[in-house]
Image (cartoon, coloured by chain):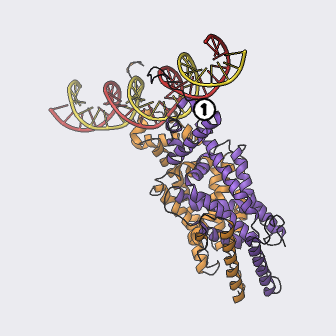
Chain colours: A orange, B purple, C yellow, D red
Amino acid sequence: MPPRNALKRQVNRLPPERRISDIMAAAKEVFVEKGYNDALITDIALRAGVVEGSIYRFFANKRELLVKVVEHWFEEMLRDDAEQFAAVCGSWNQIRFIVYTHLTSIHRDPALSRLMFQEIRPAPDYRGSHLFELNRAYTNRLVDVVKVGIAAGDLRPETSPSLVRDLVFGCIEHRTWAFLRGEGDFDPAELADAITNLVHHGLALDDEPASPIESVVARLETATARLEAAAGIAPTKPSSALPR
Amino acid sequence: MPPRNALKRQVNRLPPERRISDIMAAAKEVFVEKGYNDALITDIALRAGVVEGSIYRFFANKRELLVKVVEHWFEEMLRDDAEQFAAVCGSWNQIRFIVYTHLTSIHRDPALSRLMFQEIRPAPDYRGSHLFELNRAYTNRLVDVVKVGIAAGDLRPETSPSLVRDLVFGCIEHRTWAFLRGEGDFDPAELADAITNLVHHGLALDDEPASPIESVVARLETATARLEAAAGIAPTKPSSALPR
DNA sequence: CGATGGTGATGAATGGTATTTATTAGGACA
DNA sequence: TGTCCTAATAAATACCATTCATCACCATCG
């Protein structure tokens, strides 16, 4: 056995899968602790027990490493949620379930959620990425719930399912930003109830006979509102506000 | 006059305000074009007609420069919106106005909006910053609208005003992310209507008083009153009282 | 059993960029 | 007109992601 010779460099050979998972585990740690920009490749390499250059054998660059780490997390999450969801019935309960599980994920992994929101999603190549597809599948469950609810007569037929998706996920994100910055805390169950109720009241079909007068006045109100908007807001391009 | 001597360096002395505004204008350009990370101080200095070091005389670092640029934009925006808002009456119209103007800002300045969402807001020192205060004032208008609406009996008493704020601004943000990434377009007026309707249906008090006609007529009256106000019959500040 | 080629792994460069610093020029003021 | 103060400069520094020339381990073959 050769003595610990300073001139001989030590090499530790491992199967690629093992190396990759070591690096990803270390990267996850560092990204979570430091955020993307302050995470150092040196630090990741150190914790993974490799040298900086080795990371570039498996990942094209720092960003790809980030994407892979978040993808891994997201996929795991989806697997866990999927079959549970299948057991939930009724539009209110289904919406509540989706809101609740999403809130729980954020509450459990704030740093990773934040990386997803702040670093991944705004990237110009996000659409077209695997994470985009995963996220689409994730959020489309809500779209489907709304569609089914409309078909079943539970929800207002004129609501846009995709707008409901943005309403719900946008609300959750906006509500949790302070927490994601490390300020304060929230209770997922409580907040899930509040959001679901608020949204659902906007969706629930009011079983009123809906007299003809009703709709006529509603149209009148809309017309005047537009008129006001056009008159009060922008002299620059008044026409567009009057689509008719 | 000294000849253009390569050994003598040219110095262009300017009043500080002028230098600062030059630098900020150049920085705005570059940040808008390239985004925060890809914006180079060198580039900014070049366009501002100064040398890199000079920027650090007026701004502590790149991030402070960014914050100042966004602050400036935001303040300007607030000034423009403020008095217009004062003229709008009725909770539906007020919400619609807020949604519409916000959508318009995003539509007009996507890059700056994006910097605000992606770079500024997630920073750990955001709360406590001037921009936080500005943004709070901006979004609190909606909170006030909801509070007044509840007090006036227009909106469900059990709704949380701050949750409505998150619902509305979160929805807008989520909806516009694709546009902010440079994919596709949206129509502010149309989207404002859709969002306002969706949210308002979740807020509007549904229990009809005994006679449907009664409330229908009341709404008609409200609508015409608004129209009068908008037309300039009752101009300066009819809003704060929120009649009725 | 020894040589050898392929490749995982290394750590020292490289390059790009924010930030700092020593030095200079212009103007205000005496 | 001389002197000091400070804006402005340009070169230097520091920090990192990324690249690259080289090395050491293993399998395979002679």
Residue A86 visible to an observer of this rendering:
no
Q: Where residue B157 sits: x, y (%)?
A: 81, 69
What residue sits 52% from the left and 35% below the top? B49
Given residues A55 and C2, the one toward you in this image is A55
Mark 1, chain letter?
B
Element type at mark 1: loop
| A153 or B29: nearer the viewer | B29
On the image, the x and y values in percent for residue B106 come to 59, 57
Which residue corresponds to the image point at 57% horizontal and 54% vertical from the top-left? B109
Q: Quadrant of residue B186?
A: bottom right
**Picture quadrant of residue B128:** top right
Q: Nearer the viewer, residue A191 or B169?
A: B169
Answer above or below: position of B39 versus B103: above
Would you name the residue on which mark 1 appears? B14
Q: Is residue B241 above or below residue B82?
A: below
**In this view of the protein, which residue sits in the foreground, B81 or B127?**
B81
Give, as a three-letter code, the residue at label 1.
Answer: Leu
Image position of A232 (left or right of D16): right
Q: Is residue A125 above or below residue B189?
A: above
Q: Position of residue A125 (x, y in %)?
A: 46, 53
Q: Would residue A202 appear left or right of D1 to someone viewing this image?
A: right
Residue at 69% across / 81% down in the picture?
Answer: A220
Residue B99 shows up from this direction = yes
State the quadrant of the C terminus of chain B: bottom right
Q: Residues within 10 Å of mark 1 (few under 14, many from 20)?
A: few
